[in-house]
């Protein structure tokens, strides 16, 4: 709950237009509510996802991210497996801190919605904070907030177009 609407819907639309299969996962099943009123049906639990079956994971931001995602061990494990398999990983807004807490930003350039807690997470995760809308370092793409959602989605689709399925 409390995801930032356009940080989910903009990449979701871009992926659909590119012909990608989309699965929405969270810490609980049911309907997730966005901060601006959007809803999303959660298809599966994060704990049920298998990195071997995924080409990309995008961690959506919003006020719910620190509460539900920043310290989620299942999500951290999944992200580490994806990184080990050289899969595409994206995070927008406050969720850049999820990647940092998981250890996948160690030595990487990244951006985040810049508040003290998220900046501390990047620093603690040994990431180099870059004050830009979208930052790509290898297969990891981060964005700083809802205004960056279109550019973030475009960067994700471009990187995914390089994946051999």
Image (cartoon, rainbow, N blue to C red):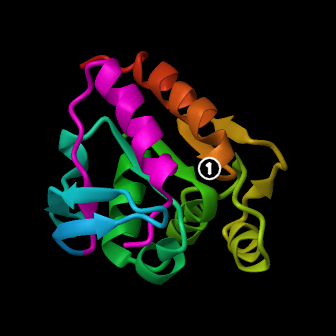
Query: Foreground: 70 or 77?
Result: 70
Determine the image quadrant of residue 15: top left
- Look at mark 1 in the image and give the residue it sits on: 146
Image point 50% across, 20% down: which residue? 158
Q: Position of residue 124 (x, y in %)?
A: 71, 74
Q: Position of residue 28 (x, y in %)?
A: 21, 75
Relative to 139, say whether 143 is above or below: below
Q: Quadrant of the N terminus?
A: bottom left
Q: Position of residue 56 (x, y in %)?
A: 36, 39
Q: Residue furthest right?
A: 131
Disc 1, SS: helix
Q: Position of residue 97 (x, y in %)?
A: 60, 67
Q: Is residue 19 magenta?
A: yes
Image point 52% across, 67% down: which residue? 98
Q: Which residues are magenta?
A: 1-27
Relative to 6, say whether 49 is above or below: below
Q: Residues within 10 Å of mark 1 (few under 14, many from 20)?
A: many
């Amino acid at each position: 709950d409390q995801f930032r609407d356009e940080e989910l819907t903009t990449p979701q639309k871009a992926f659909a237009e590119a012909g990608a299969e989309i699965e929405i996962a969270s810490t609980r099943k049911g309907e997730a509510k966005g901060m601006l009123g959007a809803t999303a049906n959660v298809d599966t639990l994060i704990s049920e996802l298998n990195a071997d079956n995924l080409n990309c994971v995008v961690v959506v931001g919003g006020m719910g991210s620190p509460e539900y995602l920043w310290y989620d061990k299942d999500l951290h494990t999944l992200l580490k497996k994806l990184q080990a398999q050289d899969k595409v990983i994206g995070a927008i807004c406050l969720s850049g801190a999820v990647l940092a807490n998981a250890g996948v930003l160690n030595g990487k350039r990244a951006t985040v919605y810049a508040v003290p807690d998220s900046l501390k997470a990047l620093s603690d995760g040994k990431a180099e904070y870059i004050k830009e809308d979208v930052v790509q370092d290898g297969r990891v793409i981060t964005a700083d907030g809802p205004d960056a959602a279109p550019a973030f989605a475009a960067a994700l689709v471009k990187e995914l177009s390089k994946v051999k399925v």
